[in-house]
Every structure is written in C-alpha cells, then in structure tokens.
Amino acid sequence: MPSPLRIAILASGRGSNFAALLAARERAELPVEFVLVASDKADAPVLQLAQSAGVPSVVLDPREYAERRDYDLALFERIAASKPDLLVLAGFMRIIDGDALKPWAGRMINIHPSLLPKYRGLHTHRRALKAGDAEHGASVHYVTAELDGGPVIAQTRLQIQPGDDENTLAARLLPLEHQLLPAVVRLIAADRLALREGGIRFDGEPLRKPLRWQDGQLTR
Ligand code: GRF
C-alpha cells in the first residue's frame, strides 16, 4: 500500500475545515496523515483541535519578526521540517511571501469562500450580497503569490435567497466547504490532480474549468 499523503495545515482561527478533514479521515475516507498544524495565533481554537487529535502544532508570532518575509521563511522552514507532501491553508489569514511559497508550488491549496475569481480577499459574503449575485460559493485553489489568485481546482455553489444576510449565507456555505475540501484532498491523495506549467491536470487531462461539487461528488 502507498504511504499516506502527509499534510500540514495552516490556520489562524476556528479550524472547522481542519475538523472536517479529521472527520473524513476518521471515516476512513481520506488516506492521509496530518503531520503538523501551523498557526500565527497562539489562541487559535484550531490548536486545541490539533491537540485533541494528537497532531503536532507550531505557533510563530509575526510580531516577533521585523519583516513579513522573515516570518514567512521561518514559518515555512518549520513546516518543511515535518516533511509534508501537501500544505492546506484552512483559514490562514495572512498573505504569504512569494519566496516562501516558491518551493511549494503545486503542493499548497487554499479554501476561499467565494466563487473565484470573484471576491478575492475578505468579506466575500457581504460583497456577493451587495453585488446582488444570485449565486455564491466556495473555491479550492492552488496557492500562488497572487492572493486568492491561483488556479481553481473545484467549487461548490449555492443560491442566494431573498432575505439572506452575511450570517445566514456563511452558515449555509460552511457545511458545503466541509464537503468540498476533503473531496479535493482525496483527489490529491489519489494522485489525480497536478499543477503543470499549462495549468491543472485532472486524471492526466487539462482541467479547463473548475470541478464542481454536486450531489456528493466532484464532476467535470
Ligand atoms: C472558511 O470560511 C474558509 O473558506 C476561509 O476561512 C474560513 C475558515 O474557517 N478561508 P475555519 O477556521 O476552517 O472554521
């Protein structure tokens, strides 16, 4: 049997997406090993989750570094020491320096609560509502130096209802995120996705538009 995919998580907050990955692994749906949870916040609840799951964690405080680049290089050195195959950004609320990212090209993914390329950055639910969008969603993408700008692997969509506000929208989207992220990680663990110079390849074929999470599966 091939050895399980080694995953390092980067997270700044609550960690519900990490919890969803842990749960999928518990259900034997994800052949992965969580080797590290790295955080920039000493009080992030995600660290308690790591502890109860027996996953090692590391916290580095950005305030102890003069430059963002120094911080990022130090953080990624710590991450590299745990020898992950894949880095998953699950609510990591920092922009990462391009030099720190470079060695991880094609081996780092992020989950973002919008239908990218719409609404990179913060307050995505608010912005979708303000724009009067009929649909909203979440995306999992490869991380590049451009904030929330890397090639999109897969998306989940939902209809915006009359009367929705930021909270109701976020509350309906989050459970879908919790399905989308493990599904994408499962494809990576099965070696079905790759980032090449010309873009994403899925099962050896170019992926021309993001996979779609629908009826409990990812489809082209
Ligand atoms: C999620 O909405 C995710 O899409 C975004 O940050 C939030 C993290 O939530 N990148 P959690 O910490 O996983 O609960």
Image: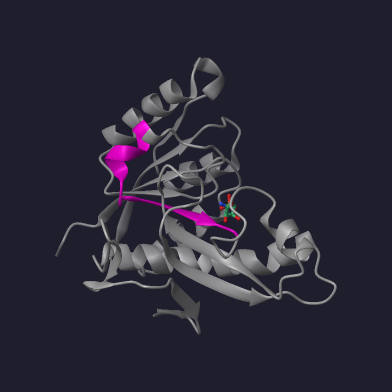
Q: Which residues are magenta?
A: 99-113
For residue 190, above or below residue 144: below
Who's the residue at 67% across and 56% down the image? 124
Who's the residue at 59% across and 59% down the image? 113
Residue 101, magenta (yes or no)? yes
Quarter location, residue 8: top left
Quarter location, residue 71: top left
Seen in the image, is 66 located left or right of residue 136? Answer: left
Extreme-right residue of the structure? 163
Who's the residue at 52% across and 46% down the image? 49
Extreme-left residue of the structure? 1
Residue 5, magenta (yes or no)? no
Seen in the image, is 114 located left or right of residue 192? Answer: right
Extreme-front residue of the structure? 198
Who's the residue at 54% across and 60% down the image? 117
> Looking at the picture, how far across and down is residue 114, in whole percent?
60, 61
* Quarter that holds the N terminus: bottom left
Seen in the image, is 159 located left or right of residue 35? Answer: right
> Looking at the picture, how far across and down is residue 195, in whole percent?
29, 58
Seen in the image, is 67 located left or right of residue 14? Answer: left
* Quarter that holds the C terminus: bottom left
Which one is nearer the viewer's eye here, 22 or 215?
215
The structure's colour scheme is one colour
> Looking at the picture, how far across and down is residue 59, in whole percent?
48, 29
Which one is nearer the viewer's eye here, 7 or 220?
220
Extreme-bottom residue of the structure? 215
For residue 75, above or below residue 24: above
Q: How many marks?
A: 0
